[in-house]
Amino acid sequence: LYPDGLECGLCVCARRRYAVRPWPRSLFGRTALVIIALVVLSQLLSATLLYFYHIGPRAERAARATGIEIKTLTHALRLLPVSQQERFVRELEQKQNIHILSGKETPDGIALNTYALRNFEQRLGLQFERPIEIRWQQRLMWIRWQDDGSAIWIGLPRLLVERELYWPVAGWL
């Protein structure tokens, strides 16, 4: 009985409060929590495997191919006489959409801050002895190449790089 003799009123003893549990109390809730945790874990694992076995090697191949293309273009320009260089540059622009500017001209561009393109830039920089500068435009990737004191800007189509890096991620999602 309570002190006032009635059976209703305030409780003298404190009630036991339950602490908030990080897991549900029912079997169904715990099973659902385990299933959700396993799905999240499998997605993280598959994303990690996709990067290490597919996206990373493709970025490496794209950087290697771009580096070889840049070296080939600069060697071809160096070997051609000045009279044929202009014709060679015009043909590259018309047929391959590859642009070449002298070092005095600087293309407009921005530094993109996506992980895949930063990864590509880092891997491309490892292909050369000297540091390179890369600028991105809407349709072109400009790379500054210095050779024997002279500098040129080589503009390559962006689609070649982006298609290599992003289509597996889009397929995975």
Image (cartoon, rainbow, N blue to C red):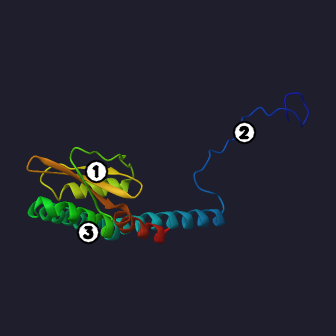
* Inter-mark Cα distance, 2 to 1: 68 Å
Identify which amino acid the numbered label 2 is placed on: Arg
Q: Residues within 10 Å of mark 3 (few under 14, many from 20)?
A: some
Q: Position of residue 134 (x, y in %)?
A: 28, 50
Dot 3: what SS? helix
Tell which tag, 2 or 1, sits nearer the viewer.
Answer: 1
Nearer-N-terminus badge (3/2): 2
Depth check, mark 3 against mark 1: the one in front is 1
- Disc 3 to disc 1, how far (Cα)? 18 Å
Q: Is residue 35 left or right of residue 118?
A: right
* Residue wearing tag 2: 15
At x 58%, y 62%, the residue is 33
Identify residue for label 1: 134
Q: Which residue is mark 3?
A: 61
Residue type, mark 1 in image: Ile
Q: Residue furthest right?
A: 6
Earlier-in-chain disc, 3 versus 1: 3
Contact, mark 3 vs mark 2 (Cβ under 8 Å): no
